[in-house]
Amino acid sequence: DFFDGVGGGADPEARLKIMKDSAIGVFGAVGLILLLLFKIVCLTAILAQLTPMKYLLIAAVPALCRWSMASLAWKATYPRSKGTGHAFVGKVTGSDLILGGIFLLPALVVGVSAYVLFLFSLMPSVWLRRKSKVALGGVTGDVLGASCEMGEAAGWLGALLCLFWIL
């Protein structure tokens, strides 16, 4: 929905209207196909590695990208009066982020790779916060979903790089 709205609308209101539509458009379909192909390639390459560390990386990536989604909702503005994301956007506190971060501490068992995974998983959220503020007037539930999926894809790329160059 995020890619359909940003790719198809001329102004924030038009983009939000497109994102509300449940049908997938061309931009959404292309984005989804590319995202899935990217994840398949990264995961296939990760699973081909013979190191047991790959299992720890596979466990860490989804957790890190969900935390980055919470960081995107922190101090963000919701551009609509109501919607699915309204319950989360702008309502995540610093304490929530710290508490969520505590649950990520086991990821440190992978050493320096944890920092690489953290940065890779966080980058899409940083970009989406800026892009959605300009394009939509704030962060919606669709933006949070895009952040989760893009953060996970970036995390798989980071995990792959860690397996080849760090571990």
Image (tube, grey):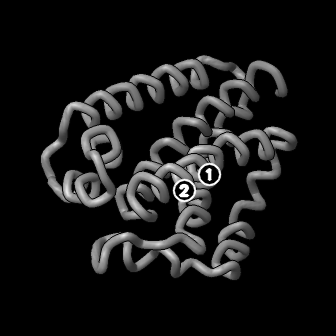
Up-down: is 137 above or below 153?
A: below
Type of the residue with mark 1: Val
Name the image quarter holding residue 33: top left
Q: Is residue 120 left or right of residue 113?
A: left
The one of 73 and 163 positioned closer to us in this rendering: 73
Q: Is residue 52 left or right of residue 121?
A: right
Q: Which residue is mark 1?
A: 126
Asked whether disc 1 touches disc 2, contact meaning CB atoms under 8 Å apart, the reply is yes
Name the image quarter holding residue 13: bottom left
- Tag 1 secondary structure: helix
Up-down: is 45 above or below 32?
A: above
Q: Which mark is residue 28?
A: none
Mark 2 closeness class: few <14, some 14–19, many ≥20 residues within 10 Å? many
Up-down: is 163 above or below 134?
A: above
The one of 91 and 106 positioned closer to us in this rendering: 91
Mark 1 closeness class: few <14, some 14–19, many ≥20 residues within 10 Å? some
- Tell me residue 148's x, y (percent): 48, 51
Q: Which mark is residue 129?
A: 2
Up-down: is 34 above or below 77?
A: above
- Tag 2 secondary structure: helix
- Tell me residue 38's x, y (percent): 46, 25
Q: Is residue 128 left or right of residue 112?
A: left
Spatial CA distance of label 1 from label 2 is 5 Å
At 20% from the left and 58% from the top, the residue drawn is 17
At 76% from the left and 57% from the top, the residue drawn is 106
